Amino acid sequence: MRVTIKDIAKRAGVSKTTVSFALNDPERISAETRDRVLAIVAEMGYVPDPVARALTTGRHGAIGLLLPQPIHEALANPYLCEIVRGIGETCEERGLALTMLPPVRGALIEAARRAAVDALLTIGVGPGTEVAELLRKRHLPFVAIDGLAADNMVNVGIDDEAAAYELMRHILDLGHERIAILALMPEVCAAPASCFSRVCELRLAGFSRAFAERGRALDAPEIRVVPVEGSLEGGRRATLACLESGDRAAMPTAIVAMADAAALGAYAACRSLGISVPADMSIAGFDDIPQASLLDPPLTTIRQPGSEKGAKAAALALALLAGDAVSHLVLRAELVVRGSTAAPRSGPLQAPPVAPRLQ
Amino acid sequence: MRVTIKDIAKRAGVSKTTVSFALNDPERISAETRDRVLAIVAEMGYVPDPVARALTTGRHGAIGLLLPQPIHEALANPYLCEIVRGIGETCEERGLALTMLPPVRGALIEAARRAAVDALLTIGVGPGTEVAELLRKRHLPFVAIDGLAADNMVNVGIDDEAAAYELMRHILDLGHERIAILALMPEVCAAPASCFSRVCELRLAGFSRAFAERGRALDAPEIRVVPVEGSLEGGRRATLACLESGDRAAMPTAIVAMADAAALGAYAACRSLGISVPADMSIAGFDDIPQASLLDPPLTTIRQPGSEKGAKAAALALALLAGDAVSHLVLRAELVVRGSTAAPRSGPLQAPPVAPRLQ
DNA sequence: CCGGTTAACAAAATCGTTTTACTTCACCGT
DNA sequence: ACGGTGAAGTAAAACGATTTTGTTAACCGG
């Protein structure tokens, strides 16, 4: 059915080797034979099977990205989108394809088994996890994005603790007392011991330090840490739950989200409840997605270079593949103060005089 | 170095067959042997090579998406993002990975050769093109998105001619005389005969019909058709070029973009020039990307179901793979009139009284 | 006791390439 | 005339699985 190299060889009256040379190493054979073979290749419409080729050469021409969520969810998060775009830049440089590997029926490890790629990037996978272990068994070079730095694993990320500290300091400096923290849930619970994802732990530690500095604590009753899906819908639901329950005097005056995507949901929830930002509610995020500066009011957030993360991580993975020694990368992140955070109103929360215009 | 099935077989004192059965068809062998083999598999950390497996089974567990642009450019377009998300939905259902295949050093055909996938989706590839031909040679089932319907190729799209007609009718109904059309350039010029992409031709035909209906023509001097990259930057540049050159009385009063992404650029250009939308300039787009309704003013556009396009196209490709007979799909598109289009001002363009607030 | 079925496993073919390790032959200088 | 060199091409061995076909022995009814 399919035309194989054997068909070409037979038709041209040469060996498979010669056909292979004609295509891959033209200098090895005479111009005459080469042209004849090539003519037959064109005539019969022969295209070498990429799989068979990959089997012998050991090169696939693709790098993989292990996603903690289904593709359609992952790309709904602008920050992840940025990371993927960054990876895409490196792919472009090297002429590679990018295989996105979502969990197979909920199992990330299954995706890691199946990956037919030259190198792999992971998102939010820590060292010592089942997945990391498997990749090592497969001898597949891989680099973690937003995982954790560790000896046996290369990671690309930011100083999450410091960034979180800075963000919370800003909120506390404004005078907020009652604060809701929208914490990231681990999409795929590789380490079921913890309810939170790895970077989330670090950020909580940073928050904690900011509180401690003021003699306060993260587990005080006026601070609520809510695990939330890192999406607009997740943020919206969590915010509504926070604001609808309890009496108004006990309501938070600030919402700190660990992802801008979730902060977007907080905007939506506030709007639907007629709560004005930042007059009645301060909102802060994490990531600085492209929309953040276009919101009304523009979102105060921690800027982290998503695209650069992806690009650098991919480059590191390829360096690993090439056998180079590489080390962790800690990229620069910074607090960007915009209009969504302000000092809390002193009196009790009340209906705003004018319907707020948001987004 | 790597642990192969042979190593397991030797260590367990059985044949490769038995190991393979233990993993893939447990019923075929005795529970005793199976458990012993499986124990050794776990102990030695054996993971079957996906490539070797793909070679024999003929299944890769992935579908491919042939992109007309580098990944980072493609994902910068929210509409393409939606399509990819749709494909992701189908991937999720079937437990498949998604390989994004950008042109290799500018050559889309090269990406089509290399694709190691079960089925392929293409964007903007027409029938009779080199790529379509190659895929047929490879016996690779594929479905085109926004290509052209043809006998020998399955396509998923909308009725571009009708949609464009409707959009332009709306603009003309408002009374616009001088109009700039931002037309899509083919990212990869598969058919160098035409300066425009395939869907672009159809849309121009639709525009043309709307003009003809009023005794006017697309090639009249007051109508400018500008080829433009389908991105914010591309739209911005083209709009600036349109508005900066020529005297004000000859300036267009409406900009019709064939992609919302480009319309976004038109917004930016107008804002930077102090031109108020829609008072001094009407802007219309195509696609209805998620941002469109959040702009200020909200964008008038043609809504087309990007995510559905992707999901359905992927499902069709898999049906093709399964040997089912499938046919084209024409999805529903509709005009969504929002605030960015209005009747043109009668007098000459002048500085707006209030600085416009955009986005 | 014997042909026939079945369970359990093994041997070998297959998938479609690349690559290594020859063979053959012409040519060249001495 | 003769060993050496290089060019041109081939046969066969990987690559690492799956799958088809065999083989062996046990078991079973008659």
Image (cartoon, coloured by chain):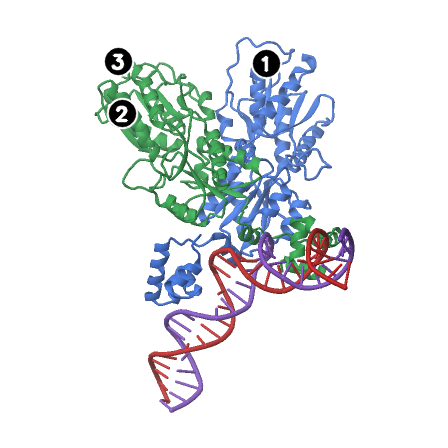
Chain colours: A green, B blue, C purple, D red
First-in-chain label (2 vs 3): 2
**Quadrant in the rendering for residue C5:** bottom left
Whole-Å distance between the Cαs marked 1 and 3?
A: 43 Å
Q: Is residue A172 left or right of residue B139?
A: left
Measure the C-alpha gap from mark 2 to mark 1: 47 Å
With B31 as the anchor, is B163 left or right in this view? right
Label number found at residue B273: 1
Chain letter belonging to callout 3: A
State the image coordinates of residue A356 (x, y, percent, origin top left). 39, 18
Secondary structure under tag 1 reads: helix
| Position above or below: B53 against A247 | below
Question: In which quadrant will I find the C terminus of chain A?
Answer: top left
Look at label 1 and name its amino acid: Leu
Cα separation, mark 2 vs mark 3, equals: 27 Å
Q: What label sits on residue B29 in the rendered view? A: none
Quarter of the image where one finds residue A266: top left
Is there one chain holding both mark 2 and mark 1?
no
Chain identifier of the residue bearing label 2 in the image = A
Question: Which numbered circle lies on residue A347?
Answer: 3
Work out whether residue B25 can be spotted: no
Q: Are marks 2 and 1 in contact (CB under 8 Å)?
A: no
Q: Amino acid at mark 2?
A: Ser
Horizontally, residue B55 falls left or right of residue C25, namely: left
Q: Nearer the viewer, mark 1 or mark 3?
A: 1
Residue pointed to by mark 2: A208
Do the residues indicated by labels 1 and 3 lie within the same chain of the protein?
Answer: no
**Location of residue A182 in the rendering, given as x and y in whole percent from the top left corner:** 32, 29
